[in-house]
Image: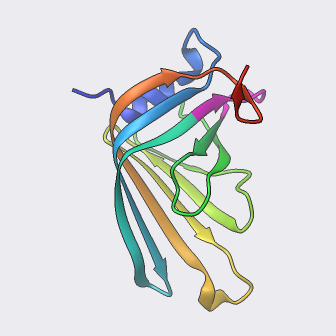
Amino acid sequence: MPPSILSTITNFPHQNSPAPLQITFATLEICSHQNGALLHSVQRQRSRILLQQTTQKGLAELTVLDNLVFSFSFRFQLPSAPTCQEVDMRSLPRPLDQGKLCLDDEKLQLSFRIDAPDPSLRVQVTQVYRGILHLEHRQPTLCGHEL
């Protein structure tokens, strides 16, 4: 049985290693909507995120490694209890905004908007990760090379 996603994230700051934690999930479903209509839906296998501690107590940084267009990072308040949590995604890179992270035992869900000057061109994206396949502590990197 794969480890619980919520407990893996909740227990992350209490691990012995300060190294970032790469989590590989069995599946990732990405859906995008524009003006309420489905634009695109795709499923991927073996998608990864990278979880890192920050210098701010109670905050972690999550990097989405396998996105449709580009990788991105954001910060979020770590859950204090292993119960279903919904938290704001902080420090999202532009043009991303209005991000939410929802965690429970079975899934990690990211919801955010791709902003545009014309409101009719804005896109709402939901990414749902399920089933932890692999956990690996990674060495910090500098310009893409391990130190």
Q: Residue at x 40, y 42 (%)?
A: 84
| Image quarter in which the C terminus is found | top right
Look at the image and say whether residue 110 sits in the magenta stretch: no
81 or 71: nearer the viewer: 71
Relative horizontal placement of residue 8, taking residue 133 as reference (left or right): right
76 or 38: nearer the viewer: 38
Q: Is residue 85 above or below residue 127?
A: above
Q: Is residue 17 above or below residue 146?
A: above
Residue 137 position by quadrant = top right
Residue 144 position by quadrant = top right
| Image quarter in which the N terminus is found | top left
Q: Is residue 83 visible?
A: no
**x%, y% of residue 78?**
59, 34
Residue 143 position by quadrant = top right
Extreme-front residue of the structure = 145
**x%, y% of residue 131?**
30, 39
Instruction: Give, as a single range, the part of the protein colored magenta.
Output: 51-60
